[in-house]
Image (cartoon, helix red, strand yellow):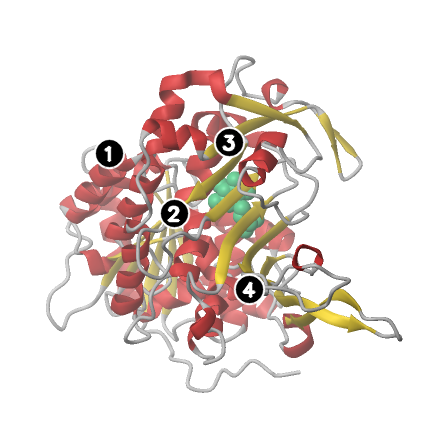
Amino acid sequence: MIQTDTSGVRRPDPCCFVIFGATGDLTQRLLVPALYNLAATNLLPDHFAVIGVGRADLTSDDFRNGLVEALGKFATRPVDRELAKKLFNNLSYVQADPSLDGSFDTLCARLLDVEDRYRTQGNRIFYLATPPAGFAPIVKALGAAKLVGEEDGGPWRRVIVEKPFGTDLGSARALNGDLLSVLDEDQIYRMDHYLGKETVQNITMLRFANGVFEPLWNRNHIDHVQITVAETVNVERRGAFFDATGTLRDMVPNHLFQLLSLVAMEPPSRFEAGAVRAEKAEVLDAISHYTDEQALANSVRASYGAGTVNGETVVGYREAPDVSPTSTTETYVALKLHIDNWRWAGVPFYLRTGKALSARKSEVAIKFKAAPFSMFRETPVERLAQNFMVLGIQPDEGIRLHFNAKVPGPAIRIGGVDMRFKYADFFEAAPSTGYETLIYDCMIGDAMLFQRADAVEAGWCAVEPFQRVWRETKGAGLATYAAGTNGPSEADALLGRDGRSWRHL
Ligand code: BG6
């Protein structure tokens, strides 16, 4: 077991952490447990305070009590009362609404008071944990109240923006425009929680800390790549949000494209935010832009019907609460993409993601080209096991290489075997929500794990052809699958046409 090494870990500057959407689900389930985990691992600044902002009329005591309760429910490690008390003592609540003139005056006064009391030196993080409609108005109101300005050598001001960042290319551009009219790009931290996952970050280490893989990592040796994010959860209580959003927008330009860009980007010249983010944006920008016809031929969208997932009966998507009975929103997407550059010319990237599937599994599978011929007469090339390298993101965290070996015995027989690395065998995982690294990185000013404006826009640009053609064809191309299955047969046909098949879920 290799212990996590915390030597050389930078202690963040003193700062005040202001949460918009402070009474919402995200704050309770993820942000507060993450702040607690940071406190428990001694990664919060020595001088630190939290201000919750919301529309509800609450006292700081009400707010604090709500969060104590939430921590009791959602903490990912046993809660030490003294430590929790210390964290919650530095916490207060302000009622504010960006649409009301002067509403940020109270926030301004509270900030100055808190900064003085807790000696946070004027450094501020504003975390926008609100519905997306709130992002631009809040940032504009922060600008108008002069709460986010920076001066040379003065305190820093940073804004974390949750996903979804826009709903298409136009709205993402407009939102970037609004934010950049108040803030500099290096003050904006666009969140994608997939980048907080160790297994996702490890894709970079696997590729660039090892000499052995990089020579193989191109069109000469790789046949195709499969990226899967399969979920067993259904839309549950999120019907209203989901029906207006759909799986493509909810998952592809963000989470799936994070995986794709880390697997496919060129080696950055330095391991620092500017260089890494430039390469990620570049590769997203190289995704082929399909015509309407190509977009239809290279995509499958489907919604789930009634079925059974993990032994539980699930009603069909259109019967779910807050979903229109005539909805044409997709809960499953499969795409075949190409990356137009020298490294990847001719190598298809197949992406699939969906809800209410038979298994929860996120992985990137790299399929290497088959041996050119088989000298083993009894086993023709087609019967050899396929050489897959599988990067398991969750819940099976690890890396697996599938290759051929001799089956012991006098006859020449060949069988597929696995070489396997499991995180849990080597590293002790700290209990986490996945948000700790991202909050910590924002506190130390490292934007590597956040999305830059150009990458967000390149991502939307790549899905734009699908959005366009699906809008035009309305529900016409929508397939179905029963909840609890592996998805629609049309997705199998998408690979079948190329003589390939999806890995088992
Ligand atoms: C969120 C999506 O961003 O990611 C959800 O809105 C999805 O629909 C979730 O379920 C998946 O995240 P994870 O970490 O559970 O894979």
**246 versus 15 height, above or below:** above
Give how far apart the Cα atoms at labels 4 and 1 are.
Answer: 43 Å
Q: Amino acid at mark 1?
A: Gly
Residue in the image at 57% along x and 64% along y: 372
Measure the alpha-carbon separation of dots 4 and 3: 48 Å
The kind of residue tagged 2 is His
155 relative to 8 in the view: left or right: left
Please identify the quarter of the rendering in which residue 232 is found: top right
Q: Is residue 309 found left or right of 457 in the rendered image?
A: right
Residue 480, image x, y percentages? 61, 24
Please identify, in this view, whether the residue under mark 2 or under mark 1 is nearer the observer. Answer: 2
For marks 4 and 1 on the same chain, the one whose residue lies earlier in the sequence: 4
| Helix, strand or loop at mark 1 | helix
Give the crowd class for mark 3: few <14, some 14-19, many >=20 residues within 10 Å. many
For badge 3, the amino acid type reads Val
* Amino acid type, mark 4: Ala
| The disc label shown at residue 338, or none | 2
Eye-nearest disc, 4 or 1 = 1
Circles 4 and 3, Cβ within 8 Å, touching? The answer is no
| Residues marked 3 and 1 touching at CB (< 8 Å) | no
* Dot label at residue 84: 4
**Which residue does the image show at 68% across and 30% down from the upper left?**
483
For the residue pair 205 and 288, the one nearer the viewer reads as: 288
Pointer 4 local density, CA inside 10 Å: few below 14, some 14–19, many at least 20: some
The correct choice, above or below, for 443 with respect to 292 in the image is: below
Residue sitting at x 51%, y 35%: 333
